[in-house]
Image (spheres, rainbow, N blue to C red):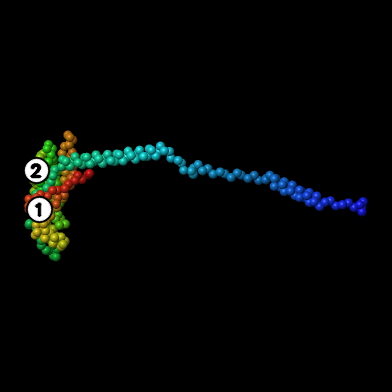
Amino acid sequence: MADGSSLPPPPGRNQSKASSARHVAFSETASAPSKVREQPYPVPDLDHERPKRIRPGCYACCAWCCLVFFAIVILALIIGFICVAIFHSYLPTIYIRRFNATSLNFTKNHNNIVLKGNVDFLVEFFNKNDKTELKYGAFKIKVTSAHIPLGSTQFSQFTQGHKNTKFLNGTVRVNKSKIDKDDADQLKIDMKNRDMTLNLGMTGSVSFPIGGIQFNDIPIISNCDAKQREIDFGNKAKCDYKIIPI
């Protein structure tokens, strides 16, 4: 028995060689270099996407520009107010001394209310300047009462010396048709009770020198409201006015 056959090899030896062969083959397959060379993934350039930082010097420059701009605006406003105050100190004082509307009559024409008559008034211009002469352009005057436009007239050009008072008479010839009934009734009541209010809207110009510099045709607008009862007691109605361009 001992010389006729040989013992088989241990089972672990053949399995170890087969496993080793398979491991070597797998390793060689895994480590074999790839024939297709992959291109590297491009790295995006984020320099243009990142917000650029603003330097502190830019903020300082913008802040100074804003401060300078606001300073110029405030300075211009101050100069403007000073100029307005200077101009107003040279302008005259205007009053309504009296007015008379007793000749106004209401009639009816084909169910329309018609107002006819005359309105007379006296306007006072007082030049309060000690040494300055005032030269006035023509004044256009619109006359209304109780929301009813009565008519218009004008004052011609005139000159007024310093510390001088000048009185100008005006007359408006009224011929109005199709007057609103409520306005007409209100005006009738005001005239009867001596509570009629006369409004004068005057637009004109004035010229005068300041410090040797002549300022010509400065446009002004004046608004005057006078109540009949106060005028009857000898009071005069002061007019408000302003320089139009300012």
Question: Dot 1: within a 10 Å radius of its alpha carbon, few (fewer than 14), some, or many (20 or more) residues?
Answer: some
Which of the pair 141/85 is nearer the observer? 85
Q: Amino acid at mark 2?
A: Thr
10 vs 220, left or right, is right
63 vs 221, left or right, is right
Residue at numbered disc 1: 230
Quadrant assignment for the C terminus = top left
Residue 225, position in %: x, y?
Answer: 14, 52
Residue drawn where x is 7% and y is 50% of the image: 234
Q: Secondary structure at mark 2?
A: strand
Residue 99, position in %: x, y?
Answer: 9, 52
Q: Amino acid at mark 1?
A: Glu
Tally of numbered discs? 2
Residue drawn where x is 11% and y is 57% of the image: 195
Residue 38, position in %: x, y?
Answer: 63, 45
Question: Dot 2: within a 10 Å radius of its alpha carbon, few (fewer than 14), some, or many (20 or more) residues?
Answer: some
- Closer to viewer: mark 1 or mark 2: 1
Q: Which mark is residue 152?
A: none
Q: Secondary structure at mark 1?
A: helix
Asked whether residue 186 is in view, the answer is yes
* View extreme (front): residue: 2
The answer to which quarter of the image holds residue 79 is top left
* View extreme (bottom): residue: 111
Residue at numbered disc 2: 165
Residue drawn where x is 15% and y is 40% of the image: 90
Could you tell which of marks 1 and 2 lies nearer the N-terminus? Answer: 2
**Is 240 located above or below residue 61 in the figure?**
below
**Is 140 located above or below residue 78 in the figure?**
below
Residue drawn where x is 17% and y is 35% of the image: 211
Which of the pair 160/87 is nearer the observer? 87
